[in-house]
Image (cartoon, rainbow, N blue to C red):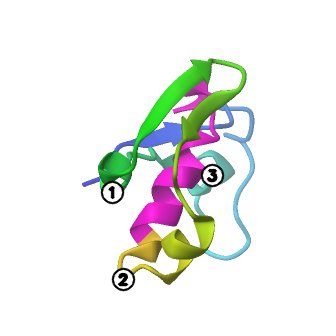
């Protein structure tokens, strides 16, 4: 089962969701994003924490056409999230 993070810090505890009656804090919990390792085959390095990861000799069109493109795009998206948000 995925870990969940309460992104509201309990701010909506007293409010109920109209759709299912749960507290909004329960509804707004999100699953923690974890990379699946699909980018390991690509040469990369971290420039700085602010700039992030650079991939050398990588063609974005190749990633989009790959059989595992969903996994690759998922991992690229996680790279764009600062580590303190994961």
Which residue matches tag 2?
67
Task: Provide the secondary structure element on which disc 1 rests.
Answer: helix
Q: Position of residue 41 (x, y in %)?
A: 30, 52
Q: Position of residue 79 (x, y in %)?
A: 55, 41
> Circle 3: is it few (<14), some (14-19), or many (20+) Cα within 10 Å?
some
Magenta stretch: give its range: 71-86
Q: Look at 36% across and 83% down and name the residue there.
A: 67
User: Closer to the camera: disc 2 or disc 3?
Assistant: 2
Instruction: State the separation of the CA atoms marked 1 and 2.
Output: 11 Å
Which residue matches tag 1?
38
Instruction: State the separation of the CA atoms marked 2 and 3.
Output: 32 Å
- In which quadrant will I find the N terminus? bottom left
Instruction: Answer above or below: position of 60 versus 86.
Output: below
Which residue matches tag 3?
28
Instruction: Answer above or below: position of 65 versus 7.
Output: below
Q: Position of residue 7 (x, y in %)?
A: 64, 37
Task: Provide the secondary structure element on which disc 2 rests.
Answer: loop
User: Quick one: 40 or 12, which is closer to the camera?
Assistant: 40
User: Closer to the camera: disc 1 or disc 3?
Assistant: 1
> Circle 1: is it few (<14), some (14-19), or many (20+) Cα within 10 Å?
some
Residue 77: in magenta span: yes
Q: Earlier in the sequence, mark 2 or mark 3?
A: 3
Q: Are marks 1 and 3 in contact (CB under 8 Å)?
A: no
Instruction: Answer above or below: position of 28 versus 83.
Output: below
Can the viewer see residue 36?
no
Left or right: 5 as drawn, with respect to 23: left
Task: Provide the secondary structure element on which disc 3 rests.
Answer: loop
Instruction: State the separation of the CA atoms marked 1 and 3.
Output: 28 Å
Can the viewer see residue 6?
yes
Q: Look at 58% across and 60% down and name the residue there.
A: 22
Q: Look at 42% across and 79% down and name the residue there.
A: 66
């Amino acid at each position: 089962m995925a870990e969940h993070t309460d992104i509201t810090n309990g701010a909506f505890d007293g409010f109920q969701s109209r759709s299912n009656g749960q507290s909004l804090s329960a509804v707004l919990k999100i699953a923690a994003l974890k990379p699946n390792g699909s980018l390991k085959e690509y040469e990369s390095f971290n420039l700085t924490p602010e700039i992030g990861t650079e991939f050398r000799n990588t063609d974005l069109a190749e990633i989009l056409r790959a059989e595992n493109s969903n996994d690759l795009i998922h991992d690229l998206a996680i790279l764009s999230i600062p580590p303190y948000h994961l």
